[in-house]
Amino acid sequence: MSLASPVKAALGRIALVTGAGQGIGRAIACRLARDGYDISIADIPPAKAKVDDVIKEIQSYGRKAVGVYADMREPKQIYAAVEETVEKLGPNLFVSVANAGVTQVKPLLECTPEFIENEVRLNVLGLMNTYIASAKQMVKQGSGGRIIGAGSIASYQNLAPYGATKFAARGFTEASAKEWAKYGIRVNAYAPGIVDTPMWDHIDRVLAEIEGISPGEAKAKRVKNDILLGRIQEPEDVAKLVSFLASEEAEYITGQTIKTCGGASL
Ligand code: NAD
C-alpha cells in the first residue's frame, strides 16, 4: 500500500465541483484545493462574484482555479463544463463532485408540476448527466477517477418532493458504481443533515411561515431536537467526508451514500 500523502497523490489532478459558489460546494472546492487539486468551479452566471471569491481563496492555497459557467439542469451545458474544465486545467479530470442542488419546501398538495420539475431537473437529471459526462471523460483518459454526488439524510428518510430526488441520487450512485468499477472509477455520495448554508436559511424561512414561528426558530428547534452532536453542521464537515472519499484512504469504498449528519438520521 502506498504511504504517499493525499496532497502528493493529488498533484497534477483536477477536480470539478458544481454549485461551488457558496455553501457546501464552496467548502468542498476549497478543501480539495488544500488537498492538492486544481479546481474547476461550475455555477450559474449570477453567482460570478461569489465564484471569483472562491477562485481567490483557492489561489491563496497555491492551486489553480477557474470558473465554468453552466446551468446544471441543461445537459449540453454540463458536457461543455466538463470539456472546458479539461481544456483550461487539463489533462486529467480525476474528481467530479455533482453538488449543485435545490430544495423547496411545500406541502405536497401545493406542489405544481413546474415546482416538481425544477427540483427533478437539477437534483436528479443534473446529477445523472454530471456523473455520465464526467465518467465519459475519465474513461477517455484511461485514468480512473472519483465521482461524488450530493445526497442527503433525505436519501434515507423521505421529505417529499426533495427526498424523492435524493433517493434517486442514492440509487444512481449505486447503479453507476456497478457499471464503472471496471474503469477504476469509484462513485459515492455524501448525505448531510442540517448544514449552515443559504439553502437552510431558505428552508428555515419557509418552515417558520408554515409553523407560525419566528425566523431562526425552525432551524434552532431541529438542531436541538434532532442532532445528537448538539451543533449545526458546517459545510467544512461535509468537505472532510468528500476529501476522504476522493483519497486513496477510501480505495475500498464505492456505491455508498454516506451520512454525515451528527447523528440526525439513524
Ligand atoms: P446552496 O443553495 O447554499 O448553494 C447551491 C449552489 O448551487 C449555489 O452556488 C447556486 O448558485 C448553485 N446552483 C443553483 N442552481 C444551479 C444550477 N442550475 N446549475 C449550477 N449551479 C446551480 O446549497 P447547499 O446547502 O450548499 O447544498 C449543496 C448540495 O448539498 C445540494 O445538492 C443540497 O441538496 C445538498 N444538501 C444540503 C443540505 C443542507 O442542509 N444545506 C443537506 C443535505 C444535502
Image (cartoon, rainbow, N blue to C red):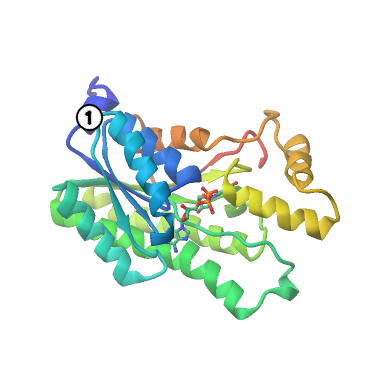
As drawn, 71 above or below 228: below
Answer whether residue 244 is visible to the viewer in this image. yes
Q: Is residue 134 left or right of residue 256?
A: left
Quadrant of the frame with the N terminus: top left
Residue of label 1? 9
As drawn, 132 above or below 113: above
Q: In the displayed image of the protein, which residue is found farthest to the front?
A: 49
Q: Is residue 185 left or right of residue 221?
A: left
Q: Residue at the spot x=37%, y=71% of the render?
A: 74
Residue 43 x %, y %:
39, 56
Q: Residue at the spot x=15%, y=48% of the render?
A: 90
Residue 48 x %, y %:
38, 54
Residue neighbourhood size for the residue with mark 1, other residues' Cα within 10 Å, grouped as few (<14), some (14–19), many (≥20): some
Q: In the displayed image of the protein, which residue is found farthest to the right?
A: 212
Under mark 1, the amino acid is Ala
Quadrant of the frame with the C terminus: top right
Q: Is residue 14 left or right of residue 236?
A: left
Q: Secondary structure at mark 1?
A: helix
Q: How many marks?
A: 1
Residue 11 x %, y %:
19, 32
51 vs 183, nearest the viewer = 51
Answer whether residue 148 is visible to the viewer in this image. no
As drawn, 27 above or below 177: above
